Image (cartoon, rainbow, N blue to C red):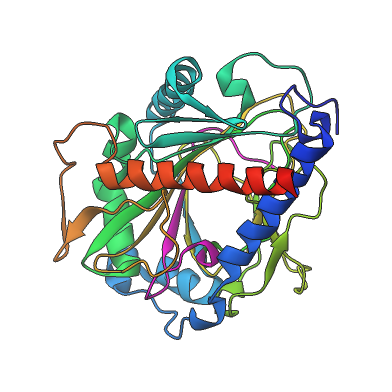
């Protein structure tokens, strides 16, 4: 890969590098805890009639399906602009944590590996979290066509609990093979991923790859990303044969709906274009969190008793509980760094 930007782990001093390694190991230990208790036995869609026979069959057989042109490209362009505006505001007014910024319950993760020197906030960013109460991001979560698909997969009572915007800038590394349910320490499964392509996704720009049918696998052990300088929080499956993997190429406005046990990864962006996506994670209302408090879990109902709900008329700021958990996570990360440096 080409030269890294100024926030690269490779440019850090040795104590800082060790702190990042310790944080990665600790993160992997936390997300693997209790994974054997998480399982799925029923792989059928909750309401095949709402999906149609082809999508219902694909969900059961493969663990995913693609809906072409669900969104208008103009809306996707507006979403991209809103995400850029938010990370620029956070760069100017947010609280700095390592290479991340925090503001009003939202936070960014910086990309550690880029192919060129960059200056703008959107060129440095990897992911932007906690969006689904805000503006256009909130509107998409309540879109009638999307809610109908979610009700078809999950059932009549559905909520969005996690959201992120992905900036896949030129040179950005892909995320290794993983299963999303590893990150979700809930009392029932599965959850559902919603991946809206807000730009074209190809193997050159760093599209997703999936392993069809792997949603029927149990949760595998995930180890810290073995690549030196990988983004914080990246873990990988190493005990699986991925020979049957297929690329998920998408046009702007296409949506991928996928099972939270489905094994998937993304590849490096070797193009000179940014590859962007808006990603939500959804599940059945009433699902309870049973692990370490997560600042990225914030339930917003979108469907009750089979009826789509309108977007809530509330301020865009995250609720106090999300901001508290995010602040607690910031404190834990800093304490980990202090103890490592003193060791």
Q: In the picture provided, is 94 more to the left or to the right than 286?
A: right
> Residue, x 43% and y 17% (percent of image)?
93
Q: In the picture provided, is 280 more to the left or to the right than 338?
A: left
Q: In the picture provided, is 211 more to the left or to the right than 146?
A: right
| Vertical placement of residue 310 versus 290, above or below | above
Outermost residue on the bottom side: it is 41
What is the span of residues highlighted in magenta in the rendered image? Answer: 181-202
Mark yes or no: residue 267 visible. Answer: no
> Residue, x 37% and y 76% (percent of image)?
188
Mark yes or no: residue 260 visible. Answer: yes
| Vertical placement of residue 16 versus 119, above or below | below
Residue 230 falls in image quadrant? top right
Residue 201 lies in the magenta-colored region: yes
Residues 14 and 2: in front is: 14
| Vertical placement of residue 103 versus 262, above or below | above
Q: Quadrant of the N terminus?
A: top right
Residue 18 falls in image quadrant? top right
Measured from the top left, where is residue 21 in percent x and y?
Answer: 74, 50
Measured from the top left, where is residue 17 in percent x and y?
Answer: 78, 40
Residue 192 lies in the magenta-colored region: yes
> Residue, x 35% and y 54% (percent of image)?
161
How many badges with numbers are in the image?
0
Residues 185 and 120: in front is: 185
Measured from the top left, where is residue 185 in percent x and y?
Answer: 45, 68
Residues 185 and 44: in front is: 185
> Residue, x 73% and y 40% (percent of image)?
173
| Vertical placement of residue 177 versus 107, above or below | below
Residues 140 and 120: in front is: 120
């Amino acid at each position: 890969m080409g030269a890294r930007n100024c926030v690269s782990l490779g440019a850090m001093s040795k104590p800082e590098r060790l702190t990042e390694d310790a944080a990665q190991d600790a993160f992997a230990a936390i997300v693997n805890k209790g994974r054997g208790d998480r399982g799925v036995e029923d792989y059928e869609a909750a309401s095949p009639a709402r999906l149609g026979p082809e999508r219902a069959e694909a969900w059961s057989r493969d663990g995913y399906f693609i809906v072409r042109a669900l969104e208008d490209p103009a809306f996707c362009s507006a979403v991209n602009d809103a995400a850029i505006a938010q990370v620029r505001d956070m760069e100017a007014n947010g609280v700095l944590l390592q290479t991340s910024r925090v503001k009003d319950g939202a936070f960014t993760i910086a990309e550690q590996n880029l192919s060129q020197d960059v200056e703008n906030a959107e060129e440095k960013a990897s992911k932007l979290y906690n969006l689904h109460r805000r503006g256009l991001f909130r509107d998409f979560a309540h879109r009638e066509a999307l809610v109908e698909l979610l009700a078809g997969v999950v059932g009549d009572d559905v909520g969005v609990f996690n959201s992120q915007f992905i900036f896949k800038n030129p040179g950005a590394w892909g995320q290794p093979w993983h299963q999303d349910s590893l990150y979700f320490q809930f009392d029932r499964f599965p959850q559902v991923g919603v991946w809206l392509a807000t730009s074209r996704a190809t193997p050159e720009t760093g599209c997703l790859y999936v392993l069809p049918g792997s949603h029927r696998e149990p949760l595998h052990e995930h180890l810290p990303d073995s690549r030196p300088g990988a983004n914080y929080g990246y873990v990988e499956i190493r005990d699986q044969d991925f020979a049957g993997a297929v690329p998920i190429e998408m046009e702007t406005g296409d949506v991928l709906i996928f099972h939270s046990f489905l094994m998937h990864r993304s590849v490096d962006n070797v193009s000179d274009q940014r590859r962007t996506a808006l990603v939500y994670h959804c599940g059945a209302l009433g699902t309870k969190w049973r692990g370490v408090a997560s600042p990225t879990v914030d339930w917003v109902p979108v469907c009750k008793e089979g009826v789509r709900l309108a977007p809530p008329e509330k301020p865009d700021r995250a609720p106090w509980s999300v901001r508290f958990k995010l602040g607690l996570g910031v404190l834990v990360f800093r304490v980990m760094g202090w103890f490592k440096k003193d060791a």
